[in-house]
Amino acid sequence: MSVRQPSAYRPTKPDIAVFVSGVTSMGLEILAGRIIAPQFGSSIYTWGSIITVFLTALSLGYWQGGKRAGEASNRRMCWLMLGTAGYVAIVVYGSDQLLLSASALPLPARYASLPAVLILFGPPTYLLGFISPYAAELSAKEGTGEASGHVYALGTIGSIVGAGATTYFLIPALGIDAIGLLFGFVLVGTALALTLPALAPTPAAASVAIALLLVVAAGIGPVAFDHRGDVVYQTQTAYQELEVIDNGDERTLYLDGARHSAMDLGDPDRHVFEYTRYFHIPMLMVDDPDEVENVLFIGGGGYTGPKDYERTYDVDVDVAELDPEVSQAAKDYFRLEESENMTVHTKDGRQFLRETDKNYDVIVLDAYQKDQVPVHLTQLGFMELAADRLTDDGVFLANIISAPSGAGSDFYRAQYKTIDEAFASTYSYRTSDWGSVQNIEVVATKADTDFTEADLAERNERRDLGLDLRTEIDASLDPPETDDVPVLTEDHAPVENLQASTVGQEYVIERTGEEETKPEPASIAVGSERYDRARPAPTLDFESSVPGSGPLGSAPA
C-alpha cells in the first residue's frame, strides 16, 4: 500500500489563488450590502441586485477565463489579483460618489440599486472569475474531472471562509474602509506570492503602487462636506452602520444613513420630531392611566419614546432592541439610563413577546424604516401575539411610514387591515397635513371601543398627561379602503411590493418648535423648520424621494 508524502498535501500556487479568490469574492459580496444600504436600503431588491451582479460577473469571468485558459500562468493570475486590488481601492475611495451618480438614474425602485452594484462590484468580480479556469488549467491533478472538482472545492471553501469571516468578525470589528483595505492587501500579497521565488520587477513595482493606492484611498477618503453636521461617533454594528451626528444643538442618530432619533442638547426632554408626541395617545385610550404599570417598546433607537414614558408616568418600561450597539449609543450619547423602571432587552421584538410571561398595558412598535421593514413584525401572527400580551384594556401602537391615501399608501392600508384583523378596534393618525409619505400612527385596542375625537378630547382635558394632545387628536384619519390590499401573513407578506408605491414621494417629518405649541399650517417654503426629510440636500430642509436617492426615512424613536 502506497503512503502519500506530506508534501503531496502542500497547496500549489493555483490552489492558493483559487482559495483567495473565493474568500475575497464572497467577502466583497457581504460587504456590498453595507456599502449599498445607506443609499438604497437593504430590501430584498437590493440584495437581489447584489446577488445577480456577483453571479453574472463570476459567470462571465468563468466563461472568458475558460476560453483563454490556454494562456494561463501564475504571472497572469498575479495581474488579475492586482487588477482586482486596484479596483477595490476605487471602491474604498469613490463609493459615495459612485452611489450618488448611480442614484440619479430614473429607474423603478426595485431596480434602482442595480447600476450602483454593477459599477462598484461588477469589474472586480469579473476579474476574479478568471482565476478558477486558469487554476484548473494549471492544476497538477490528473484528468479534467479531478482538476475541476479540486478547483470547485477550494473556491467554495474560500467562499465559506470569506462569508463567515466578513459577517461574524470583520464587519462587527472594523469599518468598511478597513475591510476593503484588508481584502486589497490579501490580493496584493497573493499576487506577490504567485511570482515567487523569482520576483519580477514589473509585478513587484505594481504591487507596491497598488498597496500605496489602497492606503491612500482608505486613509484620506473622498473630500466632501457632510451637510448633516459633525460626526460625533460612527461604527459598523452587526446589523447596520450607526452614526451620531451633531448639528448645532441637535443630536441625531442615523442607522444605515437614515435618521432614527433626535435630541435637543439644550432641552433633552423636548420632542424634536412632532410624531413622537403621538406615542402618548394610548394613554388616552386606557381605562385609567394611573393604573398603567407595564409598557413595552419594540425598537429603541435613541430611546426618545421609552425615556419619555419613564419620565412622564409611573410605569415600568421594557425595550426590546435587537442591536446592542444601538442601546449602547443611546446610553453614551442620548442620556439613556437603565434603572428599576427602565430595562433594555437585547432581543428581537417577536422573540421577546413569545418568551415573556408578562402582560403589558401599552405596546409601541417603533422598528420600521421607510425602505427597511422587518417583515416578521408586520404579519398577522405578530399582531395576534401582541394582542395576547396586552391586558384586557391594553393599547397597541404601530409607527408606520407611508402615505395616508392615494399613491404611496399601499403599505399603510395593508398594515391597517392586518392590525384590524387582530384587534377589536383600530384607529389611525397622520402626523403631517401633507399627502406625502409620513409617519402614520395606527393605534388599536384589545377591547371593543368606539372612541370619537370628542371622547379623546374630553379625556385629554381631564387627564394630566404632561402634554396637550389636542392637535394630535384632530389628526385622526377615517378608516382606509383596504379591499385591494392583503392581510399580511406568514405565508404572504409582500412588504417590498407594497412599499414600492412610495417611490417618487417626499418623506415628511414634521418638527416641533422650541416650545410645545400647536403647529402652524404647513408651508412649502424653502428653509422651513417644519418639514424635514431624512438625509436632506445641503441647501434644503426636504427633497423628493426619487428612485435610489437613499433611505428616505426611518422610525425615529
Image (tube, grey):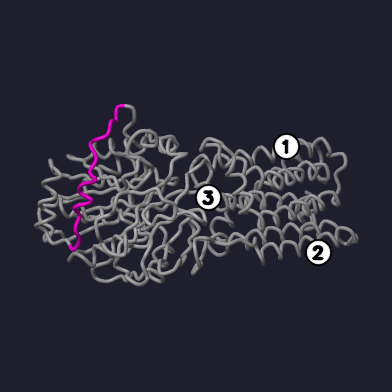
Residue 478 falls within the magenta-colored stretch: yes
Residue 68 falls within the magenta-colored stretch: no
Task: Provide residue 486's location: percent of width, then percent of height.
Answer: 33, 31
Q: Magenta span covers which residues?
A: 466-483
| Residue receiving disc 2 | 208
Residue nearest the viewer, comparing 105 with 154:
105
Please tell me whether the stretch drawn in magenta is mainly helix, strand or loop: loop
Q: CA distance from mark 1 to mark 3?
A: 26 Å
Residue in view at x 84 percent, y 38 percent: 68
Q: Quadrant of the C terminus?
A: bottom left
Q: Residues within 10 Å of mark 2 (few under 14, many from 20)?
A: few
Q: Outermost residue toward the front?
A: 525
Does label 1 or label 2 sit earlier along the sequence? 1
Q: Is residue 62 left or right of residue 263?
A: right
Task: Provide residue 378's location: percent of width, then percent of height.
Answer: 34, 42
- Quadrant in the rendering for residue 490: top left
**Label number found at residue 60:** 1
**Label number found at residue 37:** 3
Does label 1 or label 3 sit earlier along the sequence? 3
Task: Provide residue 408's location: percent of width, then percent of height.
Answer: 39, 37
Residue in view at x 21 percent, y 64 percent: 316
Tag 2 secondary structure: helix
Task: Provide residue 390's location: percent of width, then percent of height.
Answer: 19, 50
Does label 3 or label 2 sit earlier along the sequence? 3
Q: CA distance from mark 1 to mark 2?
A: 29 Å
Q: CA distance from mark 3 to mark 2?
A: 32 Å
